[in-house]
Image (spheres, rainbow, N blue to C red):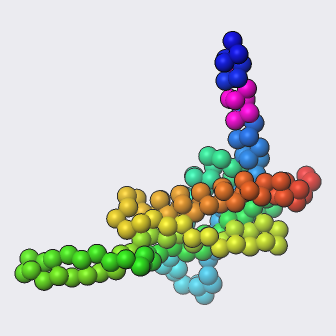
């Protein structure tokens, strides 16, 4: 009976802790550079990453539809391949060795809460499966970790409704 009670309390506290962090409201958007009316070739990539980051954050935080109702604003500012500092060598059919730098997917976001701003880069190693989604997952994980560490401050800064 004591084990059952302890298990029930553990589940209850876990749910309460999860709900407390779920109370942090996050707005995820993208920042479009002024293209002067021309097509921005990177807009679709940023929009895809916004969708990925939103999906990942919705698991533990409350994703909202407007910046005015958010405690934290996350802006996807870009994504691209970045060298990792390592290289891979391959041999072609003629026996020649070719060495190329390893490039991993990276999603760049800016987190803003009040006057505080922080740049975050989510990474996926080279040859990772679904590299852009994994890079977005890494960025979202870092955002979740930051909001959890700063939850009390974020809630204290919240504007009354």
Q: Position of residue 6 (x, y in %)?
A: 70, 23
> Where does the magenta region start and end?
8-14
Please give the name of the residue rendered at 68% of the width and 65% of the height, measured from the top-left corner: 74
Query: For this rendering, which residue is in front, 3 or 78?
Result: 3
Please give the name of the residue rendered at 74% of the width and 69% of the height, measured from the top-left corner: 112
The answer to whether residue 160 is left or right of residue 68 is right
Magenta portion: prevailing SS class: helix
Please give the name of the residue rendered at 63% of the width and 84% of the height, measured from the top-left corner: 34
Query: For this rendering, which residue is in front, 49 or 147?
Result: 147
Q: Position of residue 43 (x, y in %)?
A: 53, 73
Say if residue 98 shows up in the picture: yes
Quick check: is 11 in the magenta stretch? yes
Please give the name of the residue rendered at 15% of the width and 77% of the height, measured from the top-left corner: 91
Query: For this rendering, which residue is in front, 107 or 39?
Result: 107
Residue extending furthest toward the bottom: 36
Quick check: is 74 in the magenta stretch? no
Task: Give the quarter of the image for residue 7.
Answer: top right
Task: Give the quarter of the image for residue 13.
Answer: top right
Residue extending furthest toward the left: 94
Q: Position of residue 85 (x, y in %)?
A: 41, 79
Task: Give the quarter of the image for residue 145.
Answer: bottom right
Q: Position of residue 71 (x, y in %)?
A: 79, 59
Vertical comparison of 147 with 105: above or below? above
Count of residue discs = 0
Residue extending furthest toward the top: 1
Q: Quadrant of the N terminus?
A: top right
């Amino acid at each position: 009976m004591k084990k059952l009670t302890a298990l029930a309390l553990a589940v209850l506290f876990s749910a309460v802790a999860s709900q407390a962090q779920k109370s942090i409201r996050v707005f995820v958007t993208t920042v479009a550079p002024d293209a002067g009316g021309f097509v921005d070739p990177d807009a679709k990539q940023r929009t895809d990453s916004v969708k990925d980051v939103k999906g990942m954050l919705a698991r533990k935080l409350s994703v909202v539809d407007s910046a005015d109702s958010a405690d934290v604003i996350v802006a996807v500012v870009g994504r691209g391949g970045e060298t990792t500092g390592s290289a891979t060598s391959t041999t072609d059919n003629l026996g020649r060795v070719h060495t190329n730098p390893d490039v991993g997917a990276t999603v760049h976001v800016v987190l803003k809460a009040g006057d505080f701003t922080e740049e975050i880069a989510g990474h996926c190693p080279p040859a990772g499966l679904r590299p852009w989604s994994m890079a977005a997952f890494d960025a979202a994980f870092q955002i979740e970790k930051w909001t959890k560490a700063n939850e009390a401050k974020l809630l204290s800064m919240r504007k009354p409704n």
